[in-house]
Image (tube, coloured by chain):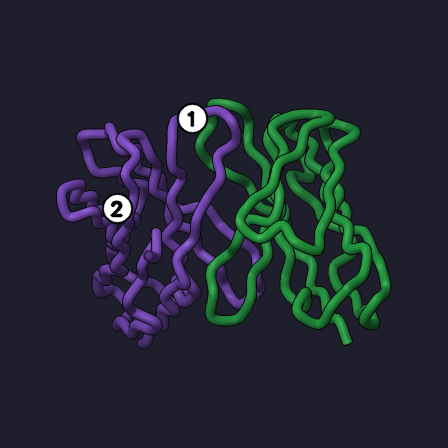
Chain colours: A green, B purple
Amino acid sequence: NAGVTQTPKFRVLKTGQSMTLLCAQDMNHEYMYWYRQDPGMGLRLIHYSVGEGTTAKGEVPDGYNVSRLKKQNFLLGLESAAPSQTSVYFCASNRQGQETQYFGPGTRLLVL
Amino acid sequence: AQKITQTQPGMFVQEKEAVTLDCTYDTSDQSYGLFWYKQPSSGEMIFLIYQGSYDEQNATEGRYSLNFQKARKSANLVISASQLGDSAMYFCAMREGAKGGGNKLTFGTGTQLKVEL
């Protein structure tokens, strides 16, 4: 089992560019999440999904879109990147009824 | 108001000593869960321990225990016999509401623990 993987590991964008972050899990988990981590702050929830084809907003959803077309994948999109979106992005997943969330290794994004 | 408060930005502990990392929380839900995660310098998030609001016994996982005081709304992490490898950032987190519908977590700002020889 690879667990939760994230692609890419690191990316530099210019303001206004778009990109998609990919999260994949091979544990057949129903729930998936995207968080961002900024210096001096804990992780904050961006969007989440409770199943294939469903998504919902978290605490800081503005500027991001998500899609869950397949159960194992959760995509995070930035349509027009801004410097304020410079952050480390973590994906996580867990099985329905299970408390523990398993995190991916993170994607470091720098927006210039 | 902060839902999760970690008041210790940094802590030092001698190797083999025990250390307590503080966490207080704020919720009006009856059903909730409390978590501790470890983030070493390599950046990954490692689950340590979980406590449900209805659990009567404090959770323990090896050298980690969670000192759960419901009336005080505190969920402190106790690490016994500290090791150099325990040096890391530690985050307290809370899941509000009943299970199901996604386990949305709210995190504290973290405590940086340094274990010294």
Residue at image point 31% right, 44% down: B62
Q: In this view, does B7 lie above or below A35?
A: below
Residue B8 or residue A18, whichever sits in front: A18
Residue B35 or residue A42, whichever sits in front: A42
Secondary structure category for the residue under label 1: loop
Q: Residue B24 carries which label?
A: none
| Residue A105 visible to an observer of this rendering | no
Q: Determine which quarter of the picture holds residue B32.
A: top left
Q: Which of marks 2 and 1 is nearer the N terminus?
A: 2
Give left or right: position of A33 versus B116: right
Residue beneath label 2, please? B65
Residue at image point 64% right, 65% down: A87
Say which chain tag 2 marks: B
Residue B10 or residue B61, whichever sits in front: B10
How many neighbours does mark 2 have within 10 angstroms: few (below 14), some (14-19), or many (20 or more)? Answer: many
Residue at image point 36% right, 72% down: B114
Q: Determine which quarter of the picture holds residue A69.
A: top right
Residue beneath label 1, please? B99
- Three-letter amino acid code at the position of disc 1: Lys
How many neighbours does mark 1 have within 10 angstroms: few (below 14), some (14-19), or many (20 or more)? Answer: some
Q: Nearer the viewer, mark 2 or mark 1?
A: 1
**Label 2 and label 1 in one chain:** yes
Residue at image point 31% right, 59% down: B5
Secondary structure category for the residue under label 2: strand
Q: How many marks?
A: 2
